[in-house]
Image (cartoon, rainbow, N blue to C red):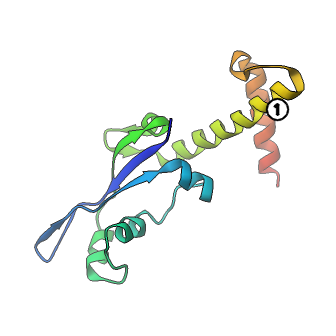
Amino acid sequence: MANKITVSVHFYFKGIEYQPRLALDLDEIMRLNDALSTELYSSIAIANHIDLYSYEYEVMLEEEILFSDAEGLAGDFFHDGYFDIAGFEQAWRDQQYLQLLDAIAKQHMGIESLSAQPQLQAALLAAYTAGKNSR
């Protein structure tokens, strides 16, 4: 299932109410950046035709980003309007690593699914993570 979430900002500028929104494909963002963009405000602004060098944008920056409509793994990290970005990023990476490790275990050990052997799965994930972090 695809990982998606909607981000929005609610603010007033010159007496006019604004609620710019943007639906994010979290899988695409993670594949491209290996992290969710810290530039969410600018992404929302651009998608909603708000000039990044305007007073309107400066007012928007003063308001909190709101999250809604979480789908997929993102739903596990979305509670009461709060989205745990760091938790989602780590879980998404682990999910990607586990797909790689499943293929390796199948090729080299004939294991169809590592989830059936959680201790082996945890050991391979720890080894993979340690190797990746040692670079």
Residue farthest toward the left in the current orientation of the protein: 15
Residue annotated with mark 1: 104
In the rendered image, the vertical position of residue 27 relative to residue 43, given as above or below: above
Q: Which element is circle 1 on?
A: helix
Residue 36 is left or right of residue 99, and the answer is left
For this view, does 33 lie left or right of residue 83? right
Q: Residue at x 75, y 29 (%)?
A: 102
Q: Is residue 35 above or below residue 113?
A: below
Q: Residue at x 42, y 38 (%)?
A: 71
For the C terminus, give its image quadrant: bottom right
Residue 122, percent from left and from top: 73, 27
Q: How many marks?
A: 1
Amino acid at pointer 1 = Ile
Name the residue located 30 percent from the left edge and 83 percent from the top edge. Answer: 54
74 above or below 49? above
Query: Does residue 9 appear left or right of residue 117 in this picture?
Result: left
The spot of residue 14 in percent (x, y) is 14, 77
Looking at this view, name the residue that lies furthest to the right: 108
Q: Residue at x 77, y 33 (%)?
A: 101
Q: Residues within 10 Å of mark 1 (few under 14, many from 20)?
A: some
Q: Position of residue 45 (x, y in %)?
A: 35, 70
Q: Where, by quadrant of the figure, is residue 47 drawn?
A: bottom left
The image position of residue 15, as x and y in percent, is 10, 73
Residue at the top extreme? Answer: 116
